Image: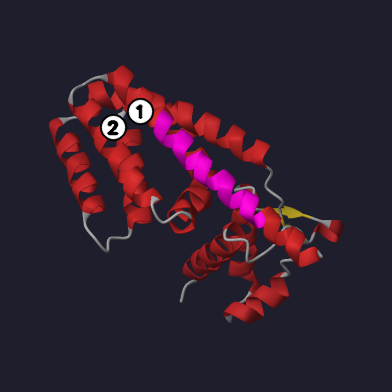
């Protein structure tokens, strides 16, 4: 197994545990302990921790040790607000700039997301990537790519945190695609903002549950 693949697996595992509240704010993330746990060297472990730090999920504590970061509702609101605006702009541009092939690919992604048993979190990422690239603005795409990287653990977790979120997300995707295919940029943007606001709502509920669990644990 390559160091990069090991780092990817450690990053994915720790992301899920942090967002799900299994790793609590302030919990230490020692390189040696994690390396032993995953059966790898410290190099991929360190790489995974640095990636988590760049996404805002962990931070440096005393003696430069990594700790799970406390994510406040205000931080997540700011992140999703910026994300929503950029996603909306990409959707608006995509409505006018997507090629026929890109439009067909977007419809195919939408159809895949409707199938039972599909990995919806992965399909959701591809759906948003298709619109980001369909906007055909390299600078905007790069900015959005950075925010996607920082928000993706939370956005993917929403489908596990609230079982009916997948169905409402599918309906929101269908409406966005209709607007894009109709070349209605304003409607596509408005629907994307509402879509991202709905995602934020689920994430904030999830964060509240984590806070309540921490209080119960500390009593």
Q: Residue at horizontal 26%, vertical 33%?
A: 175
Mark positioned earlier in the residue sequence (2 or 1): 2
Q: Main secondary structure of the magenta part?
A: helix
Q: Which residue is mark 1?
A: 191
Mark yes or no: residue 138 visible.
no
Quadrant of res 94: top left
Mark yes or no: residue 63 visible.
yes
Work out which residue is located at the far right of the displayed protein and give it. Answer: 62
Colouring chosen for the image of the structure: secondary structure
Q: Residue at horizontal 57%, vertical 61%?
A: 20
Q: Which residue is mark 2?
A: 176
Tag 2 secondary structure: helix
Residue 149: x %, y % from top left = 50, 46
Quote the CA–CA distance across marks 2 and 1: 6 Å
The segment highlighted magenta reads 194-210
Drawn side of residue 13 relative to residue 217, left or right: left
Q: Note whether 87 is above or below 28 in the view shown.
A: above
Q: Residue at horizontal 47%, vertical 68%?
A: 5
Residue 1: x %, y % from top left = 46, 77
Drawn side of residue 69 relative to residue 99, left or right: right
Q: Note whether 95 is above or below 211 in the view shown.
A: above
């Amino acid at each position: 197994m390559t160091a990069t693949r090991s780092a990817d697996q450690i990053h994915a595992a720790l992301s899920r545990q942090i967002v799900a509240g299994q790793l609590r704010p302030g919990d230490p993330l020692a390189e040696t302990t994690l390396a032993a746990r995953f059966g790898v060297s410290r190099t991929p472990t360190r790489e995974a921790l640095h990636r988590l730090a760049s996404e805002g999920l962990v931070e440096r504590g005393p003696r430069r040790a990594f700790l799970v970061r406390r994510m406040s509702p205000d931080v997540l609101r700011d992140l999703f607000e910026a994300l929503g605006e950029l996603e909306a702009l990409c959707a608006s541009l995509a409505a006018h700039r997507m090629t026929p092939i890109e439009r067909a690919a977007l419809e195919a992604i939408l159809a895949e997301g409707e199938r039972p048993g599909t990995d919806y979190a992965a399909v959701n990422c591809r759906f948003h990537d298709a619109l980001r690239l369909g906007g055909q603005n390299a600078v905007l795409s790069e900015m959005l790519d950075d925010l996607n990287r920082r928000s993706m653990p939370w956005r993917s977790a929403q489908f596990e945190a609230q079982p009916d979120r997948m169905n409402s997300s599918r309906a929101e995707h269908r409406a966005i695609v209709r607007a894009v295919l109709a070349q209605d940029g304003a409607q596509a943007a408005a629907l994307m903002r509402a879509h991202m606001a709905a995602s934020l709502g689920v994430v904030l509920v999830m964060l509240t549950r984590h806070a309540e669990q921490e209080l119960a644990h500390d009593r």
